[in-house]
Amino acid sequence: MEVFSMIKNAVIGDGTNPITQHFDIGRHVASAGPEMVWKIYDAVRKSDQKEASVFIFDKKVADKLYKPKRKEAVSEVLRKCVKNLERFQHPQILQVYHPIEECYDSVAFASEPVLASLANLLGNQERMPTPIPPEIRDFAFHEMEIKYGILQITEALSYLHNTETCLHGNVCPSSILISKRGAWKLAGMGFLQVARDGKESFMANPWTNKASKMVQPDLDYIAPEVQVDKRCFYVSDMYSMGITICAIHNGGRSLVNSMYNPAEYTKGIQLLSISFGDAASKLPIQLVEPVEKMINRDIRYRPTARLFSLLKFFSDSVVSCLSFLDSLPQKDAGEVTTFYTKTLVDTIPKIPKKILYQHVFPFIRDELYTESDKLVHVIPPLIAIVQNASREEYRLKLMTEINKLLAMPKNALVTIALLEKLDIILFKTPVEAHKIQVLPILYNTLDSNNSLAREAAMNALGAIKQHLDEDSIKKMVLPRAKAIFNNANNVKVKMNALMCIDRLLDRMDKSVISDNVIPFLTKIEPEDPEIVMAITGIFRHMMTDKRCGLTHALLALQVMPSLLPHTTNALLTMEEFGVLMDLLRDMFDAIDRNRRNKMKLEAMHDDETIRGSAPNIIGMQRHRSAAHIDDIKRSREKDHSRHFLSVDHVSHPKSRTGREQANNHKREHRVEFYIEECEEEQENHSPAPSTPELKDRQRFTAASPISQRRVSNHSSVNANKDLSDHKQYSLVPEGPMSPGINLIPDDSSMGFPRRSSTQSLGSPVHHRLSVDANGKPRRHSAGPVVVPGEMNKPHYGSGYFNQMTPNTPRRSQPSLASLSNSVMALFQSKLNY
């Protein structure tokens, strides 16, 4: 064989292994095999760009053995290992992609993608690259990974023992490989023995220092009967499996540490029960008793691989699901469909995320690019993975494959399956990618000729409407929905189009509804009752949702005229006719209610204008008129005192002073006449009393001190005259009609009780107050001094007397506007005069 390899290498012409012609070899990532002699490299198959791993044994490693016979023995064991792997086709046994290739310097083969050996992940870094790859350095097993990994190796052993009647002979961490999908694969078949004539025992060679460690099984995992009795059984592999389980939970350390010395191995076997007692606390409680039996020196207590795989410890839905997934190629189509659509979908929420993305998702991803008939069954578990992923996980691990699936050609069934779950995809996809990557499948399906796909797209709009903006609805969705309705000959398709529009009303702007939806609905002239009821339902939706902006004007001018002809449709049932009439009545009520409320508001606004703005203007004019009269009176008194300076001036009318005095007399006469006419004008506008009480009140008012004050002003009464000779007056603050302090008669002297502004009728009588010539209050001989607070009470004006007697009706007042106009006109005529 060595000669053949040398000849083959000479033909090639260099020391490069021929496997490089078939694979592009990448970085060195791991090691495996006896004494970790295999170096594992990442690789890609050139024919189909499929990912793979290439195992290379560098023969220079065995050069230290010096003896060519021992060097060749190592190569022979490795060749046997690869040939036995090619022989077995089992999901839990490492799959070989390319057979062994050999040259003078190396032996190599290719397999399915491998992450590392179990020994590497447990800490054995012999012949590993430097530095250690981070995915191996930071690797940590999940409990579920270990559980399923143990089951996978057990199933591989069960296959070898029961189906192939073989003994593995070297079950240990260096013979177990972890694929990049997380599956545990059994390898290291270089010491495999096949049973002869149905015998269950095999001859075995004990481990010896006379042979290279590379051509012997790992001494720490060899069963005692092999080393002591030189015999092995199927359960000898179970002993090795038990020690491996302990090493997995014991930080990669075997219970027997022989240091490649048979004597030390014997001591370790004798202390095995003690060593197991220390490690048992680290095992799952359900594995303690079975593993203790597996490492028992008496083979009668050891369970078989098949029996061990039936432990309750492995009765887990996740483990069962993963096991079925690994054996999928051996299942029929019916089982695969049920598994994808039901079992896997229900189990995905329970699968740990690490196993889900490392082991489960790769299977589904591979199915996406197979036959279309299988693809439709993969969509449900794929959507389940998307639904259980976080947005960050989706963006990093799933979004690329989902986008490829959405963009690739698909049959109608796959498209419908995706549209039914499109809301889940949109929820996980970043917003900026919606229009570019996800929504095109919706728009394209609305334009397709497949009625089932179009129906699925319109149904999906109701679920994804929150992800659609107003511009997309107006320009992309609404025109397509109208086109589907107008081009459809099937009532069901038209109904779906109308239902689609109804679902999108909440996302439309008022202008879009009034300019696009309502004109479209009002132009429909259906005879089918279902269409009539669909339109009625849409308008009912608009009536109940104020955001739709269905005003009473639209109801009266567009909506109701289009609905009224449907009342004569003879195909409507009694119930359908009642629904239509109820809507029309509600529209009439809405119009009536809206118009009446608007009219009431307009009337209230007019009343407020009359009561608020006009009276204020009239009151201001009246106040200005009264103030103007008072100013004339005050200026008259000042002119009178200023111009009557001496008798001489009066006796000489031709002098300047005399002429001015004469003119002042004439001016004063005219002003007095004007004042009298103004006051008479005010009195003439008051209606005559119609009852005796009103006549008495009029006479009382005429005799009041206010009238007397008017007379005294006409006769130029001296302002310094003592007011104590007249009737008693009370001080009130200035009112809006007459500035300054006004004097009103004391009510008690007239037969009315004196009442303050804050007192009601029947309140106690106030103290009287007289004022001196300077306007200051003084004590009256008939009563106490009034407190200054009385001077701050509001002035009631002439209406004060009208409020004195509650039972007496008020005297009607003249029109303020007419009175103001009359005063201003009279005053203008006097000035002209």
Image (tube, rainbow, N blue to C red):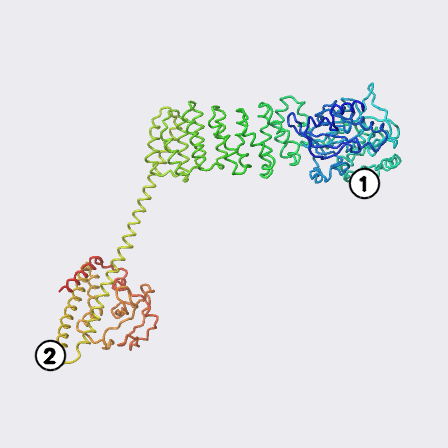
Question: Looking at the rendering, in which quadrant would you find the N terminus?
Answer: top right
- Left or right position of 387 against 155: left
The front one of 357 and 74 is 74
Q: Which residue is mark 2?
A: 652
Residue 471 position, x and y percent, is 44, 37
Rate crowding at label 2 as few (under 14), some (14 to 19) or many (20 or more) other CA atoms within 10 Å: few
Q: Sequence-wise, which precedes: disc 1 or disc 2?
A: 1
Residue 355 position, x and y percent, is 66, 34
Q: Do callouts 1 and 2 mark residues in contact (Cβ within 8 Å)?
A: no
- Left or right position of 759 against 304: left
Helix, strand or loop under label 1: helix
Q: Is residue 618 above or below residue 469?
A: below
The front one of 632 and 428 is 428
Return the mark for residue 683.
none
Q: Which residue is mark 1?
A: 278
Q: Amino acid at mark 2?
A: His
Would you identify the image quadrant in which residue 353 lies?
top right
Would you identify the image quadrant in which residue 69 lies?
top right
Q: Amino acid at mark 1?
A: Asp
Would you identify the image quadrant in which residue 615 lies?
bottom left
Q: Residue extending furthest top?
A: 197
Say if residue 310 shows up in the picture. Answer: no
The front one of 687 and 217 is 217
Residue 65 position, x and y percent, is 84, 32
Query: Residue at horizontal 30%, vertical 73%?
Result: 768
The front one of 10 and 248 is 10
Residue 356 position, x and y percent, is 64, 34
Rate crowding at label 1 as few (under 14), some (14 to 19) or many (20 or more) other CA atoms within 10 Å: few
Say if residue 10 shows up in the picture. Answer: yes
User: Given this view, does label 1 or label 2 mark the residue nearer the observer?
Assistant: 2
- Left or right position of 316 against 433: right
Question: Looking at the rendering, in which quadrant would you find the C terminus?
Answer: bottom left
